[in-house]
């Protein structure tokens, strides 16, 4: 099945093209060692991953601030490991994590090949809930920024996916039309349902084969998108 009539492709970044979990683990390994924090990096990351997802949902839904996101996810992970960390060190770790995170550049398997395939055929763009300086650093260091004509983030748009206004902002910035645009992302709520609610088609990058409605177009590997577009 091919999806016809598309001219513009919008991508999410984290967990879709940029391998957030792998890069995040490397960043934590670096900063925990740097600050001589006496916890095993792998044990910390194991607890941190689901906590981070929970906090990002709260942030996406407007229930917590950026500062609460950055503080709470670290504090909760250390609490589970029963490792006492004062607020001064937590602040240092939070800042260092954000600084180190974009310096690692692992992409999902097939990401670069997919962008090479799509670039001659489509206008490519990013829509991300991530923070401007961090996301730009990721794109530059992973050497994929040049594939994209625009990068829309929640700070620029003044709202976060799945709010329709961030999609409207991105479409306007791209000079695109909804009918000829498609969104690709890993979050069924923010990327897929958000795009569909705004009038765009969407492809769900369902890496872990989570249950989804049969009407949702989905792939488990980025290379499969070549069969759709």
Image (cartoon, rainbow, N blue to C red):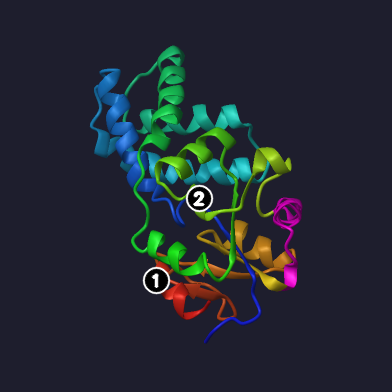
**Going 67% across and 60% down the picture, which residue do you hit?**
194
How far is mark 2 from mark 1, CA to CA? 20 Å
Q: Find out whether residue 174 is within the magenta segment.
A: yes
Q: Position of residue 76 (x, y in %)?
A: 44, 32
Q: From the viewer's perspective, is residue 187 above or below residue 73? A: below
Image-based side of 202 in relation to 144, left or right? right
* Residue placed under numbered mark 2 in the picture: 146
- Judge left or right: residue 88 versus residue 59: left
Is 189 in front, or is 125?
125
The secondary element bearing badge 2 is classed as helix
Q: Nearer the viewer, residue 92 or 158?
A: 158
Residue identified by numbered label 1: 223
Q: Position of residue 120 (x, y in %)?
A: 52, 68
In the rendered image, residue 212, in percent from the top left (x then y), is placed at: 53, 72
* Region in magenta: 163-179
Q: In this rendering, would 57 be left or right of 205? A: right
Name the residue at 48% across, 71% down. Answer: 211
Q: Earlier in the sequence, mark 2 or mark 1?
A: 2
Left or right? Give the position of 98 relative to 123: left
């Amino acid at each position: 099945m091919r999806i016809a009539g598309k001219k513009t492709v919008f991508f999410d970044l984290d967990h879709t093209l940029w391998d957030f979990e792998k890069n995040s683990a490397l960043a934590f390994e670096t900063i925990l060692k740097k600050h001589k924090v006496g916890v095993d990096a792998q044990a910390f990351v194991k607890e941190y991953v689901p906590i981070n997802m929970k906090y990002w949902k709260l942030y996406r839904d407007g229930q917590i601030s950026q500062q609460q996101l950055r503080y709470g996810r670290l504090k909760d992970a250390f609490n589970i490991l029963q490792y006492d960390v004062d607020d001064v060190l937590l602040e240092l770790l939070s800042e260092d994590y954000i600084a180190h995170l974009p310096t690692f550049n692992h992409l999902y398997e097939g990401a670069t090949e997919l962008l090479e395939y799509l670039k001659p055929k489509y206008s490519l763009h990013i829509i991300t809930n991530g923070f401007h300086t961090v996301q730009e650093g990721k794109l530059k260091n992973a050497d994929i920024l040049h594939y994209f004509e625009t990068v829309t983030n929640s700070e620029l748009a003044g709202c976060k996916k799945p709010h329709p206004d961030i999609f409207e902002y991105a479409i306007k910035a791209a000079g695109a039309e909804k009918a000829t645009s498609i969104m690709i992302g890993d979050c069924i709520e923010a990327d897929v349902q958000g795009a569909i609610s705004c009038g765009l088609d969407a492809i769900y990058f369902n890496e872990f084969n989570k249950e989804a409605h049969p009407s949702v177009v989905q792939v488990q590997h980025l290379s499969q998108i070549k069969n759709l577009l």
